[in-house]
Image (tube, rainbow, N blue to C red):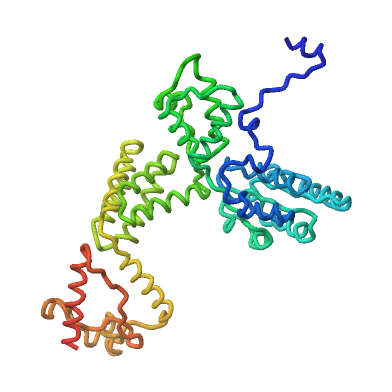
Amino acid sequence: MANLFEAAGMEREAPRPLADRLRPQSLDEVIGQEHLLGPDGALGRLIEAGTLGSLIFWGPPGTGKTTVGRLLAQATNLAFEPISAIFTGVADLKKVFDAARGRRSMGQGTLLFVDEIHRFNKAQQDSFLPVMEDGTVTLVGATTENPSFALNAALLSRARVLVFRSLDAEAIEKLLARAEAIEGRPLPLDEEARASLIRMADGDGRASLTLAEEIWRAARAGEIFDAERVQDVVQRRAPIYDKSSDGHYNLISALHKSVRGSDADASLYWLARMLDAGEDPLYLARRLIRMASEDIGLADPQALVIAIAARDAYEQLGTPEGELALAECVVHLATAPKSNAVYVAYKRARAAAKEHGSLVPPKHILNAPTKLMKSEGYGDGYAYDHDAPEAFSGQDYFPEAMGRRAFYEPPDRGFERELRKRLEYWAKLRAERG
């Protein structure tokens, strides 16, 4: 067969992936980013005006950032120059800039599309500034990372950040319908399996088309897959999650805020999501200990004990048995009464310590282990609390130049309701005893 192609002077072309065949050929065909490309969207207005400034596209994989960059160049008559920060060094950048200057001298502008721009170091990012400022290139950088942290302030000040959204179920459904049209056959899925496939895509259009291809390859003639069979066939796509990127911080934030918001069900969901994505369970255990201290505190003194016990249980049992201890802890923390009173009090005390860091303790609460120290008044006037009525002397323990301060203000809920009563009673005794 190969000889027949060669004799005919034809070259065999490798089959193109479905995602490549369905790549939009105009901005009108882009799905899921209507907030940017619609008539009132940021890009829609720029295209209507016929001019572009430098842009940063920030969003998850598979949302169309590269495609929109290419089509923007086409819509504004700019030469499209794509590079990837993974494969490009300083010498390569210099060649790209020289080529752009050459085009500019001939009256042709350049849209320089930089994929994974956050992977460039500070010096490499700084190298874009001169060619952006003099108009040699219109920079369009694409990143999955938060530009506030991943890009230099100087670069950000010269570019506008546009946020690409994950594709919702409706957008993924449109993509699958296009795929079925171009393939000329429906996906062999029942209704529940189709919904399951859309969920597996996790907002990534490219992933949805890759999954669709896997389904078509696996299906025999006349076979229709249900949801359970779909998971067996595609072996579940790994969740979009990088332990050093935004996905990691977004999910731990979701878990922390769900616990703080006393939503046990949502808290369990985010815990499961992170464990399913390969997060280190001991990292999660450490975060749960922090939540117990920061958001529950003394409203439920057992919260910290249970969080530490959950960590210890996981260390002993490992995966998957130890994960249940983390889940138990999450439910306890989510359903516990909430208080950040200790957290707030500690911040207040830290601020006071910085302000009055040179003050010494009052002499009456200092020990006097030597005769000299005793002669200097160390320990004079100290009242031993156990000798006082109700084991409370009411003395002042703050530096004399500072005076009493109130840092800890427990709320009237959980165990702190009892602590509040104690503090109020001691305050009353202190006032009575001078």
Q: Given the current orientation, which residue lies at the most extreme right position? A: 106
The percent coordinates of residue 420 (x first, y second) are: 21, 71
Residue at 56% over, 54% down = 146
Q: Given the current orientation, which residue lies at the most extreme left position? A: 389
Up/down of 418 relative to 250, above or below = below
**Quadrant in which residue 13 is drawn:** top right
Quarter of the image that includes the C terminus: bottom left
Q: Is residue 417 left or right of residue 318?
A: left
Up/down of 159 relative to 238, above or below = below
Residue at 47% over, 35% down = 200
The percent coordinates of residue 172 (x first, y second) are: 52, 37
The one nearer the camera, 44 or 406, is: 44
The one nearer the camera, 50 or 111, is: 50
**Quadrant in which residue 296 is drawn:** bottom left
Quarter of the image that includes the N terminus: top right
The percent coordinates of residue 198 (x first, y second) are: 47, 34
Q: Is residue 87 left or right of residue 249?
A: right
The percent coordinates of residue 311 (x first, y second) are: 32, 47
Numbered circles on residues, count: 0
The one nearer the camera, 352 or 153, is: 153
Up/down of 276 relative to 413, above or below = above
Q: Given the current orientation, which residue lies at the most extreme front position? A: 39
Residue at 61% over, 54% down = 40
